[in-house]
Image (tube, coloured by chain):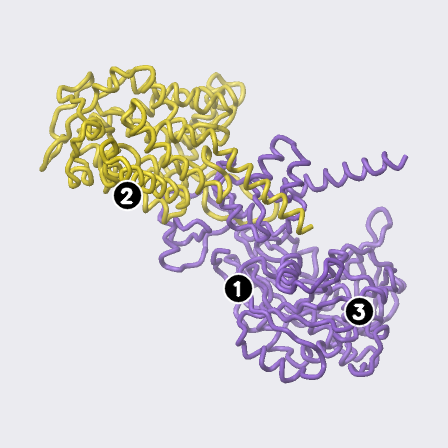
Chain colours: A yellow, B purple
Amino acid sequence: MKIIAKIFEKLGPQFDKGKILSPFRPVYQALENFFFQADLKTDNAPYGRDPIEIKRFMSTVIIALVPSFIAALYFFGWRVLLLVIVSYVAGGAVEVLFAILRKEEINEGFLVTGFIFPLILPPGVPLWLVAVGIIFGVLVGKEVFGGTGRNVFNAALVGRGFLALGYPAIMTRSWMAPGNYPLGNLATPVSISTPDALTSATPLVLGKGGELAPIQDLLIGRIPGSAGETSALAIILGGVFLILVGVANWRTVFGVLVSFIGLGAFLRFLYPASVNPVWFNLFSGGILFGAFFMATDPVTGPITRSGKLVYGLLIGSVTILIRFYSGFVEGVTFAILLGNIFAPLFDEVVIRNRIRRYARER
Amino acid sequence: MPKIAGRPASTVREIPAPNTLFIPVEQGGLSYDPIVKHGQKISFGDVLAEVSVAGGKLSLPAPAGGKVRIHKNDEGKVQQLIVETGGSEAVTRMFDQLKPEVASAIKVREALAKGGVWPLFWSSRTGGIPTLAEGERPRALVVNTVLTEPFRTRGKVILQRSWDRIVEGMKYFPRLLADYGTTEIILTHKRDPVAQRLYQELAGYAWLHFHPIPLRYPVENPVVLTRALRRHYTSIKKSDVIWVIDVQGLEAVGACLGEGIPLYQRVMALGGPGHPDPTHVVARIGTPVKRLLPKNFSTDDVLVLRGGLLKGEPVNPEVDAVVYDDNGFFFLPKMKKREFLSFMGPGFQKTSVLPCFMSRVTGAADSTISTSLRGEIRPCIACGLCEKVCPVELMPQIIHRYLYREAYDEAEAVGMDLCVDCGLCTFVCPSKIELQRQFTEAVEQLRLEHEEAAASESL
């Protein structure tokens, strides 16, 4: 600990104004603040503060993603780790570039975006595609709007949507077959280029033709699919943790799942030939991952508490509709992006109500 | 409000009266004019300074007898009155006792004004000290026994110490209240034995109602209390005035009217993680703060806040003294070292509104709170914690976003002026945004704009 402090003490002056490295001060600051708490004191009331900070807030999300990450490593091998590394490096470069250009500190939001993005991709995608996707996502989905806290759309989903629309052929053929008990795919050698064990028959694709994967496989994750989305149990574990810790709002998750299950059951009842059973819909594809980790992104969802419920209801219903009444087999990405568009509208309704209430109280 | 370490014990330690008392002339937003001369000898309770307000004069009584010195600042303006007491501790009756059944409303008000007790009342009409003029008689007088901000004098401590004075004080309330006015007592439980005793002892003297209230900061905020009361009693009209006083103020009322003793001392809670032995103390008004400090105290290590953790402002123990409405000093350790990997720790010693620290499981109190900001300043991520803690159901994150782009009118429409300045949103914000400061400045800005608009309209 003292050694690290000494290293930073030595390096610090190199980034001062006037030195060659001074534009890179945000990078130095981010590293130093990672290890040591910011040297900031309160200078007005309240003079003591709550210990919750953005770093911890984002860390809880990363901890909640770890079960899905481990499941991804198990079923699809260490290649997933490679995807994560590429995502962090490429997206991180964009973040650092903008921090330098804006002369602001590097925000921690990217640590979550960069981790989530590879988990929603097919594990067999070429590494260059991951980089293209995350760079587009961070650049167009976040930085263009002003950076963390000001983005309209979920940056990871913008990247994902971009890849789905821009590189559909590569995406549809990059699914991997999951590894089996006992070692899963952990023992398979990592391939930098596309791996051998590719398939295009994900449960959702097969489901369209009426072939339903067994529920055990869906729950545990022994199915082809996006890297972090296959294991329903891992997602639920992490997701419930995130709700208990208070970082993910239960209203959003509740809204998504209730409308998804509700509308799904209703349509299944009416049209059993063209709509799959509710349990199959729920545990296949990315709806659980989207509900717990992507819809609950506080920046892109509604700000007001009541707005979050309606937002969830919208996302769940639109996902079902896209799954069964469009050419796509999966609808979570576009449903959440659509929700992002509507979020300010839901907020506006709540705000208008409040304004009336405050006017009455005055 | 998360648990903070250093809760003061219920014992009350007597601080012996010092040889010198310091009384500032600027108190409670009023500027008092000295009516004694430099070097004059005075007795306990003599009026040292007065200020004219609507309806009469408010007085600053001497907390002890002795010789007065008038201390002026460099521009010749009177700053404080210094009383050299020579250690005199005498407490004598200053004026005649008034009998609650027969005392006239005017006499009651005069006595309270002369005894320096009047500023302890809060009026919903003025948002501060009520006018002395006879015209304003409140529809309800709220007695608040619940103080939740860490750490201010607990109501129970005052109730135990000064039960008789408190009961006596309430007997005079009908003289202050409007016809059919009521006394509303705020307690923690409806079945509190205090409620039973008060009911018995005050039967026939006043109309009492008891209200249980959850121990959640900032219930003691008078704006929050009066709003809750208005929601509870739909018969209270908007134009009705409600007054609020806390238990210690009520004790002073009882002493002043029932025993003829002016306001001369305060019971204060000394607490916080920076205090080795948190307890309550009682000291004369004018006692220098440094006499309240624990042994081996150093201002290098601890910041002393006058008030509580959330609204407290730093005091300089060398310069500042106890004033008429003090009820606590919070000892906040100063940030010394930068914690290593602070955000990763399990958090057994940190408590938060967000349940992501292990202290939520163990029930521990926060003992690591300090002057550290505990994070870096970041943009608002709309986490919603500020909305969750706001006592008046505002949406600080929305107001912040409006103010961020200087949309003052929209911010006012969304309730910025309804803010009660409790400080909880700023306390809780993970992005460490100075919300309360931003709101206060914006409200001030809006006020100036309205004044300018009104001025230009009248031209």
**Which residue is identified by label 3?**
B62
Alpha carbons under labels 1 and 2: distance apart:
35 Å
Rate crowding at label 2 as few (under 14), some (14 to 19) or many (20 or more) other CA atoms within 10 Å: some
Question: Label 2 is found on which chain of the structure?
Answer: A
Q: Nearer the viewer, residue A262 or B366?
A: A262
Residue B420 at x, y = what percent?
A: 64, 51
The quadrant in which residue B109 appears is: bottom right
Residue B378: x and y in percent read 50, 35
Residue neighbourhood size for the residue with mark 1, other residues' Cα within 10 Å, grouped as few (<14), some (14–19), many (≥20): few
Q: Which mark is residue B39?
A: none
Image-based side of B129 in relation to A234, left or right: right
Q: Residue at x 58, y 47 (%)?
A: B394
Q: Is residue A155 left or right of residue B112?
A: left
Q: Which residue is mark 2?
A: A236
At x 87%, y 63%, the residue is B55
Q: Determine whether label 2 and label 3 are within 8 Å by CB.
A: no
